[in-house]
Image: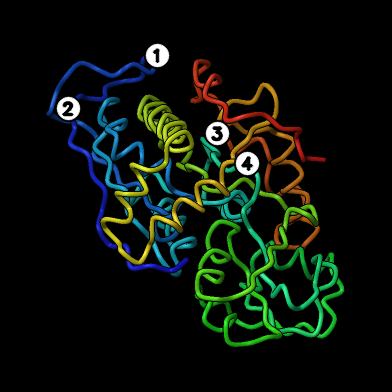
């Protein structure tokens, strides 16, 4: 859902962050020489970023001694935040697992350290009146999509797409509302709500149904940051996971903050987003909230290799992520459990 969200969320630091320590407890109180970090979002702030905004608004970054500015993105942000990370201009950003893999193949040493969305929210939105019941039935339509992204390439590989004309995705639902034989990409908790609110008849078809299911809304950093300041990474992860736990259990305070800064993002839309996102955050048994599994990364790397986007063996799945900063006590913050969908 495109929106004009330009106000930065900030917290005032009350504690300092020093050299690596053996636990994740806040450091001794200090207002000097504390790290000031930008957390760059990969889109305008929405429900998919709710846990990070919660960590800022509720003071969780503050409590671990990090001065964090949560910086909303917009069109082009998914690529830009990776470039900023790789160049060392920022140390933390939000991205998706497929972009982490592509970035590593191109030499950017990006590492995912927390994964709140265990299931991909990516969907194709069609008209209910079209009679299309599955992605395999997509035919005789215009499809607004970012057609060079791995999920779109996977669709081309797996689906017949008979007489489907792919057109650029603009991030809005206006064309969907105007055209009967039209479909578009989206996130299940975003574009479908807007389309329905504006009188449309959206039906959601999940990309995960055809096996493409990357982790989403990842907290990512770099190998260099992990090597030079592991305690900073540990603190960022601890506060972020705590924020996600708070948001998923009680999203209203954060939703009100987002809405207050941007009236275009209605409380109804944010409430719908939070509820729709809750099952996507459910983890497999024995995996903590925001945890990750090697088998999921391995599957995704293999899929992107099959698409010809990276050379076979160019990316080691084990280097794409780290769970070492997820402390044991956070395992109690699970939001339900589910069977793993990885193959």
Instruction: Kindly identify which residue carries mark 2.
Output: 14
Sequence-first tag of 3 and 2: 2
User: Element under label 2?
Assistant: loop
Q: CA distance from mark 1 to mark 4?
A: 30 Å
Camera-side mark, 3 or 4:
4
How many other residues sit within 10 Å of disc 3, few (<14), some (14-19) or many (≥20)?
many
User: Element under label 4?
Assistant: helix
What residue do we see at 19% from left, 32% from top? 13
Asked if residue 116 is positioned above or below residue 195 in the image, the reply reads above
Q: CA distance from mark 2 to mark 4?
A: 35 Å
Instruction: Kindly identify which residue carries mark 4.
Output: 279
Sequence-first tag of 1 and 4: 1
Where's residue 235, x and y in %? Answer: 37, 27
Q: CA distance from mark 3 to mark 4?
A: 13 Å
Instruction: Kindly identify which residue carries mark 1.
Output: 23
Q: Quadrant of the C terminus?
A: top right
* Colouring scheme applied when the structure was drawn: rainbow
What residue do we see at 67% from left, 82% from top? 182
Residue, far top: 22
Q: CA distance from mark 2 to mark 1?
A: 19 Å
Camera-side mark, 2 or 1:
2
Where's residue 133, x and y in %? Answer: 81, 67
Sequence-first tag of 1 and 3: 1
Rendered image: mark on residue 290? 3
Which quadrant of the view contains residue 335? top right
């Amino acid at each position: 859902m495109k929106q004009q969200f330009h106000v930065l969320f900030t917290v005032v630091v009350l504690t300092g962050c020093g050299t690596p320590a053996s636990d994740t407890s806040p450091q001794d109180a200090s207002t000097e020489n504390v790290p000031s970090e930008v957390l760059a979002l990969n889109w305008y702030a929405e429900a998919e970023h709710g846990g990070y905004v919660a960590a800022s608004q509720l003071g969780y970054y503050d409590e671990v001694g990090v001065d964090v500015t949560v910086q909303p993105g917009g069109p082009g942000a998914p690529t830009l935040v990776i470039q900023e990370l790789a160049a060392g201009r920022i140390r933390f950003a939000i991205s998706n697992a497929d972009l982490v893999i592509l970035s590593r193949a191109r030499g950017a040493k990006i590492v995912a350290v927390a994964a709140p969305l265990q299931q991909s929210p990516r969907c194709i939105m069609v008209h209910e009146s079209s009679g299309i019941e599955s992605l395999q039935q997509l035919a005789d339509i215009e499809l607004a999509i970012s057609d060079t992204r791995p999920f779109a390439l996977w669709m081309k590989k797996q689906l017949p797409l008979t007489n489907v004309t792919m057109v650029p995705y603009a991030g809005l639902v206006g064309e969907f509302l105007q055209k009967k034989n039209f479909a578009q990409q989206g996130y299940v908790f975003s574009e479908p709500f807007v389309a329905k609110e504006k009188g449309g008849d959206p039906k959601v078809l999940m990309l995960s149904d055809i096996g493409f299911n990357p982790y989403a809304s990842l907290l990512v950093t770099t190998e260099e940051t992990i090597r030079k300041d592991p305690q900073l990474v540990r603190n960022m992860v601890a506060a972020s996971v705590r924020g996600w736990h708070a948001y998923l259990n009680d999203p209203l305070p954060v939703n009100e903050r987002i809405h207050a800064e941007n009236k275009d993002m209605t409380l109804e839309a944010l409430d719908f987003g939070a509820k729709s996102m809750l099952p996507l955050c459910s983890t497999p048994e024995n995996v903590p909230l925001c945890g990750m599994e090697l088998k999921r990364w391995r599957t995704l790397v293999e899929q992107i290799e099959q698409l010809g986007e990276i050379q076979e063996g160019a990316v080691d799945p084990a280097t794409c992520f780290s769970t070492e900063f997820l402390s044991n006590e956070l395992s109690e913050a699970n939001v339900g459990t589910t069977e793993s969908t990885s193959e």
